[in-house]
Image: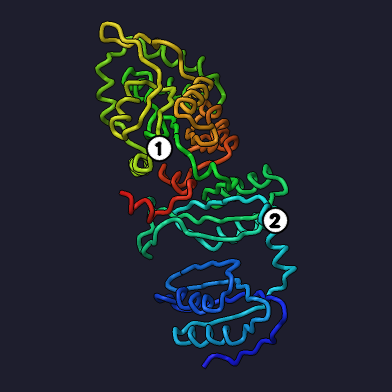
Amino acid sequence: MPPPFSWPVAPVRELILITISGIDRPAVTSTVTSILARHKTNILDIGQAVIHENLTLGLLVEFPAGEDPAPIIKEVLFRMHEFGMQVKYQLIAEASYHEWVNQQGKGRHIVTLLTRQVTAEQIAALTSIVAEHGLNIDAISRLSGRVPLDSVDSKSKACVEFSARGTPKDITQLRAAFMELSTRLEIDIAVQEDNMYRRTRRLVCFDMDSTLIEAEVIDELAKAAGVGDKVAAITEAAMRGELDFKASFARRMALLQGLDASVLEEIAERLTLTEGAENLMRTLRKLGYKTAILSGGFSYFGRYVQSKLGLDYVFANELEIVDGKITGQVVGQVIDGQRKAELLRELAAKEGISLEQVIAVGDGANDLPMLSIAGLGIAFRAKPLVKASAKQSISTLGLDAILYLMGLRDRDIRSDT
């Protein structure tokens, strides 16, 4: 039997928080709200969560002035007892409620944890940082699917999203704290302002080399030309931001002079797409997003990747080929970091959207200009300088982890494929 219940009748309205918990089963919510509906109550707040078949349901109920809540609560207690559920009730002062209402104008942030397997250490460290910087967590959701106990491997994905209320004391310091934690625990943590733009992105722009594909194509060309080590060293320095992109690009191109153009097809056919690229593109297409390659690499390979993944736009450098040989020059303007940012702006204008509605993804220093102007700029498996400079970074999971930063759940993605 449930415990006895009595409540004094008040001449003013009563606000009562009802919390119900137990093994989840059909009709719990409908049964409770049907009882409350018969007595013309108002539901001021409601929340429900199910974790491993255990339900927690909370309702903040306004009872009309002069209405005796006791028989209503008693009926809820007995009906929930029949369901095997536990019920708690708490009187909420109007002053407390008004204070809660006044907090709704405060800023909100979404903190996303990306990892291969979620541990208590990760959650404890992340939530401690959130609290230290003046944020209060309102909701926690698992975006990744259910993982069998014995199936965690190098390709596993796990994501937990935290909705936090408040304004960080210092957003730069908050990001720095998350960056240190990410490095220490080998996880990724993203923090975004929770605004309307987060749910209205329409265009995603990608770097190609070491982002959509697991190679730097210019390095592959250099290997075919017998100058692999020289070009790779220059590429690494450029991606780290130690060399100007245009100058380093000209030096690398000069080393390719005379290479037979027939190697382009051979190299394209052995390119490996990055983990998660196909799932990401398939999902973006179904959701109606426009996608683009903005690459300091070469259009021949950009078109090849476009054919594999179905992107809408490709902008990359056009190799000059004369008599079947690569001349060491490109046709037209070199696409460097600033040009990538210009192209992103042009595409946003063409699509009739704001920069806040654009996602940009890249790994090198020449990607920073476009990452900095996009509403969501993501450094993907990036060099340290780039990772430290970008607002968001993903190093632990594949490209489709971007879908988590967009707020999508695995079940949404699976049901749409």
Label 2–label 1 contact, CB within 8 A: no
Q: Is residue 237 visible?
A: no
Q: Residue at x 39, y 10 (%)?
A: 331
Q: Is residue 214 above or below residue 252?
A: below
Q: Nearer the viewer, residue 37 or 144?
A: 37
* Residue highlighted by disc 1: 289
Amino acid type, callout 2: Glu
- Tag 2, which secondary structure? helix
- Please identify the quarter of the rendering in which residue 121 is found: bottom right
Badge count = 2
| x, y percent for residue 265 | 25, 23
Horizontally, is 240 left or right of 311 in the view?
Answer: right
Q: Residue at x 37, y 21 (%)?
A: 298
- The local crowd at label 2, few if under 14, some if 14 to 19, many if 20 or more residues have their Cα within 10 Å, is few
Horizontally, is 151 left or right of 245 in the view?
Answer: left
Q: CA distance from mark 2 to mark 1?
A: 37 Å
Amino acid type, callout 1: Tyr
- Please identify the quarter of the rendering in which residue 12 is found: bottom right
Q: Residue at x 54, y 90 (%)?
A: 2
| x, y percent for residue 63 | 63, 76
Which mark, by number, is residue 132? 2
Q: Is residue 358 above or below residue 333?
A: below
Mark before the other along the chain sequence, 2 or 1 = 2
- The local crowd at label 1, few if under 14, some if 14 to 19, many if 20 or more residues have their Cα within 10 Å, is some
Single out the residue that lies furthest toward the top: 323
Q: Nearer the viewer, residue 29 or 121?
A: 29
